[in-house]
Image (cartoon, rainbow, N blue to C red):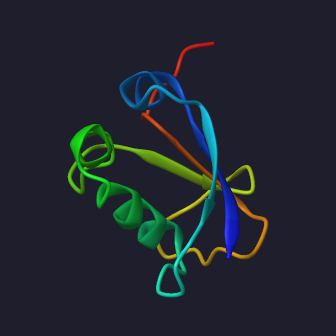
Amino acid sequence: MNIQLRFFASIREALGTSQEAVALPAHVQTVGDVRAFLRERGGMWAEALAEGRALRMAYNQQMTEAGTRVAEGGEVAFFPPVTGG
């Protein structure tokens, strides 16, 4: 399954990218799975998307929880709890 990723504010700064297209393995089926999959990259990915870190997530531009299922062509976004304008 192919999805789009978007990163905002301090998450974008930590990762050095604002967006990425990614092909997900079959076992990655929810927004939480996407976060865990990206943490497996290690380094800054593991730190920026750490399990205990306060982080907001959106799926197709709707605020969501980790259990939301993702689908082909969807967009998952990650950002800190407070972002400036």
Q: Residue at x 54, y 81 (%)?
A: 29
Answer above or below: position of 8 versus 52: above
Query: Residue 61, image x and y in percent?
Result: 73, 49
Task: Name the outermost residue toward the top.
Answer: 85
Query: Residue 11, image x and y in percent?
Result: 42, 31
Q: How many marks?
A: 0
Q: Residue at x 22, y 42 (%)?
A: 43
Query: Residue 63, image x and y in percent?
Result: 62, 53
Left or right side of 80 for 42: left
Answer above or below: position of 4 versus 48: below
Query: Residue 64, image x and y in percent?
Result: 58, 60
Q: Residue at x 50, y 23 (%)?
A: 9
Task: Name the outermost residue toward the bottom.
Answer: 26
Task: Name the outermost residue toward the right.
Answer: 73
The residue lying toward the viewer, choosing from 34 and 17, is 17
- Quarter in which the N terminus is drawn: bottom right
- Quarter in which the C terminus is drawn: top right
Answer above or below: position of 32 versus 12: below
